[in-house]
Amino acid sequence: MSAADTVVARLRAAGCVFAEDEARLIREAAATLEAVDAMVERRVAGLPLEQLVGWAEFCGLRITLEPGVFVPRQRTGFLVSTAIGLAVRSAADPVAGGEPARAPIVVVDLCCGSGAIGAALAERLGQDRTGQRSRRVELHATDIDPAAVRCARRNVVAPHRVYQGDLFEPLPSGLHGRVDLLVANTPYVPTGAVELLPREARLHEPRVALDGGPDGLALLRRIAAAAPQWLAPGGHLLIETSEDQEIAAQAAFTDNGLQAQVTRSAEQYATVVVGTRLSVHEPA
């Protein structure tokens, strides 16, 4: 058996479903055979592959990661595509956004983790259909975890900004009433269910990025309560949640004056609640 086959066999025995792909990525990331062996040992012990190789693919971008930082899930790409669709419609209808279509798109990414969502939005919103730079994006991202902020500052490049702090607290006050897209991949696992998560998440991702409180919606409610003062007229709040939580999440949005709707992707097994601050031109 070749060295490559041995790596695949070890990974498969550890339960890695895509052992061949993982083996290839490990070999590409390791400089020596000894390094390959050490990485395989850590993977077999349960370290997420993305933390092991130092990056994750997300919405066509390579997102830098380090051990202990939440790994962006592929289903969260649905939140990104939903936000882009809303921004495109708003740009086609300047009244809805309250500003001329040529104004920058102001994006705030709360609970940003590695900065994957914000980085993807900044990249894709700033391009036209041919891939050329077209419209300016002003991105602000926050997270409470120092390790996450350290990663986000490598993935979210200047002139965009990443702040460390609790939700809205570190944001410039000048953003009040200016935010077109407010996105958040908040932790939404109920506290009692955290211990039921896969071992990779339980042992190697920060609990603050997983535990959403008694019913999983503690941070969602805090964000929904504060969002109206930050959103521009016609601006949108988007938060990923679970299908089981969507009714309660939608109620949290409407209780705070946002027009709420739920969007789903069966293919990506994703649920996103969208709240819109009604513009001055629309009836409540």
Image (cartoon, rainbow, N blue to C red):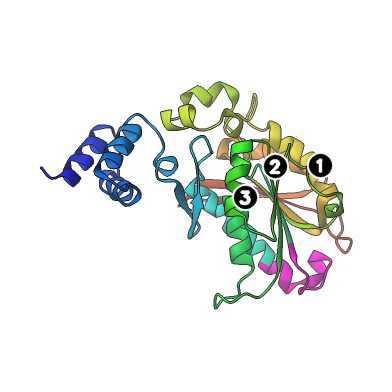
Q: Magenta stretch: give its range.
A: 88-105
User: Which residue bears the numbered disc 3?
Assistant: 153
Residue 7, percent across and down?
22, 41
**What distance separates the C-alpha of mark 2 from that of mark 3?**
32 Å
Q: Name the amino acid, label 3.
A: Arg
Q: Does the magenta stretch include residue 65?
A: no
Q: In this view, does 89 lie above or below 21?
A: below
Residue in the image at 53% along x and 39% along y = 70
Crowd around label 1: few <14 · some 14–19 · many ≥20 (10 Å): few
Crowd around label 2: few <14 · some 14–19 · many ≥20 (10 Å): many
Q: Name the amino acid, label 2.
A: Gln
Q: Please report contact status of discs 2 and 1: CB closer than 8 Å, yes or no.
A: no
Q: Which element type, helix, strand or loop, lies under badge 2?
A: helix
**What distance separates the C-alpha of mark 3 from that of mark 1?**
25 Å
Q: Residue furthest left?
A: 1
Precedes in sequence: disc 2 or disc 1: 1
User: Which residue bears the numbered disc 2?
Assistant: 250
Q: Which element type, helix, strand or loop, lies under badge 1?
A: helix
Q: Is residue 199 above or below residue 225?
A: above
Q: Which element type, helix, strand or loop, lies under badge 3?
A: helix
Residue in the image at 41% along x and 37% along y = 48
**Residue 240 seen:** no
User: Which residue bears the numbered disc 1?
Assistant: 226
The answer to which quarter of the image holds residue 40 is: top left
